[in-house]
Image (cartoon, rainbow, N blue to C red):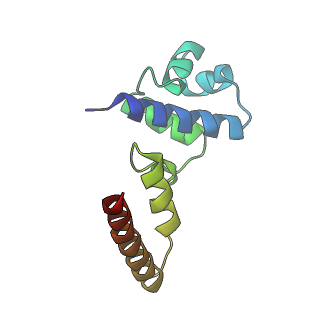
Amino acid sequence: MILETDKKIIGNKFKEYRKSKQLTQFELAEKVGLNEKQISRIEAGLNYPTYLTFVKLLDVLDVNILDFVQSAPLTNNPLQDAIMHLTKNADNIELKTYIDVLKSLKRNLKNFKGSC
């Protein structure tokens, strides 16, 4: 089941890629065989593209599926996404440090909340 937020995320990604290629919605629609209104609804998160349309959009916009997926937010929580983004390319030593720091911060927050 696709959540409404997923539709918006996907739509926004297609909009970003279209703009980076300096295409109008009309030009993109012509290249993938849709009408401009359909592209508009996909970008607005109102419609989800069919599998075939999704593949055509990726092809016309010259986007690799892995790049598309990796650039999308991982959760519906921007704060969690920010933490995941910070740790994405960290090596094991950095990850262990992050974990230790976060555990310490969490303990201190609990102690602080308990003293209020």
Instruction: Say which of 43 and 75 sits in front.
Output: 75
Q: Residue furthest front?
A: 116
Q: Quadrant of the N terminus?
A: top left
Q: Residue furthest right?
A: 22
In this rendering, the answer to whether 12 lies above or below 26 is below
Return the x and y of residue 71 as percentages of the image width and height. 52, 51
Return the x and y of residue 97 as percentages of the image width and height. 44, 81
Q: Is residue 16 left or right of residue 92?
A: right
In this rendering, the answer to whether 24 lies above or below 6 is above
Return the x and y of residue 37 as percentages of the image width and height. 55, 13
- Residue sitting at x 62%, y 21%: 30
Q: Is residue 98 left or right of residue 22?
A: left
Q: Quadrant of the C terminus?
A: bottom left
Q: Give the total number of marks visible in the rendering.
A: 0
- Residue sitting at x 56%, y 47%: 63
Instruction: Say which of 7 and 5 sits in front.
Output: 5
Q: Residue furthest bottom?
A: 93
Q: Is residue 24 left or right of residue 66?
A: right
